Image: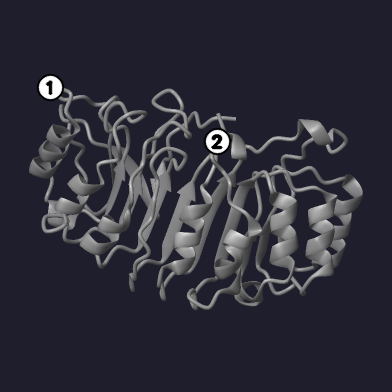
Amino acid sequence: MTIYAHITEFADLPVVDFDPARLPDVAPDAVAWRLSLTDFPTRDGDFADLVERFLAAVDPAKVTALIVGDWGEAYEESAPVELVAGLAPRLAGLKALFMGEMVSEQSEISWITQADPAPLLTAYPGLEILRIRGATQGLTLTPTRHTALRELAIEAGGLPGHVVRAIGECDLPALAHLELWLGTDQYGGDTTVEDLAPILGGERLPSLRSLGLRNAEIADRVAVAVAGAPVVARLRELDLSLGVLSDEGAAALLAGQPLTHLRRLDLHHHYLSAEMADRLVAELPGVELDLSDVQPSDQDDDRYIAVSE
């Protein structure tokens, strides 16, 4: 499956596309603004020009949520990290940023050329939400400390292990939600459970309450690691959805540490048998379970993650 539709909400705000020809009558902080060159081009087709027109049309100091869509030839040109970082004095109130929110018509998820987001974290010490789409091309991460970040998500058809290891080296004391789409090795997803060990240990993530290890070809191995992970005891939400989780992984979850303290366990898009699904429901009373999007469980060689190309 590929991504066909744009998001309609971000940071608990409705998404509004910035159209240079028509400015909606909304307060700058009442919406999440999406800037996309392919949807709303400027005369010369330059993303920096689109950004300047946006900053001239709204009060930038009041903008709290920004979505960077297609910056132009995103399959070749790196994400405009330095450009957005340089806007920090003007976007003084920015709390949420989504870098690379594109549908497949603009760029397949594994074609999006990303860059190291560390300069964004340095430039915006008050940033609370950072979401990135695309990791196969160009994504790196310099380990950093950020005391305000509450949510970090990386959506990928394949997440490189070096990025996961770097996250484990970051110091993010306020991070409550971490979401990683591990993907498949066909698109650069070479992350191993060993790479996840610092995250699952939880020592550098004291505030973590929601963990998503999604879209994983290695979902069963991840489930085995999660079953004994120290961080799980303080989670409220665990998300292993979109991957190729089978009865083997689900059995490991049930055989490991108790999970009845969870508020929610998301396993949708899975390869579980009906018997294992029933067992999960019976053994996890009070836990909100998402077992939707059942995939055929009798074809081991024809299992696929939900989001790739």
- Answer left or right for 289 relative to 277: left
Percent coordinates x, y for residue 123 in the rendering: 21, 61
Q: Nearer the viewer, residue 21 or 209?
A: 209
Distance of mark 1 from mark 2, alpha carbons? 33 Å
User: Colour scheme in the image?
Assistant: one colour
Q: Residues within 10 Å of mark 1 (few under 14, many from 20)?
A: few
Percent coordinates x, y for residue 243 in the rendering: 67, 44
Q: Residues within 10 Å of mark 2 (few under 14, many from 20)?
A: many
**Tag 1 residue:** 44
Q: Secondary structure at mark 1?
A: loop
**Residue visible at 48% across and 69% down in the picture:** 176
- Answer left or right for 244 relative to 155: right
User: Hey, what amino acid is under mark 1?
Assistant: Asp
**Residue visible at 31% across and 44% down in the picture:** 67
**Residue visible at 11% across and 39% down in the picture:** 52
Q: Secondary structure at mark 2?
A: helix
The answer to whether residue 299 of the structure is visible from this angle is: yes
Image height of 155 relative to 287, above or below: above
Q: How many marks overall?
A: 2
Image height of 285 relative to 4, above or below: below
**Tag 2 residue:** 187
Percent coordinates x, y for residue 70 in the rendering: 31, 32
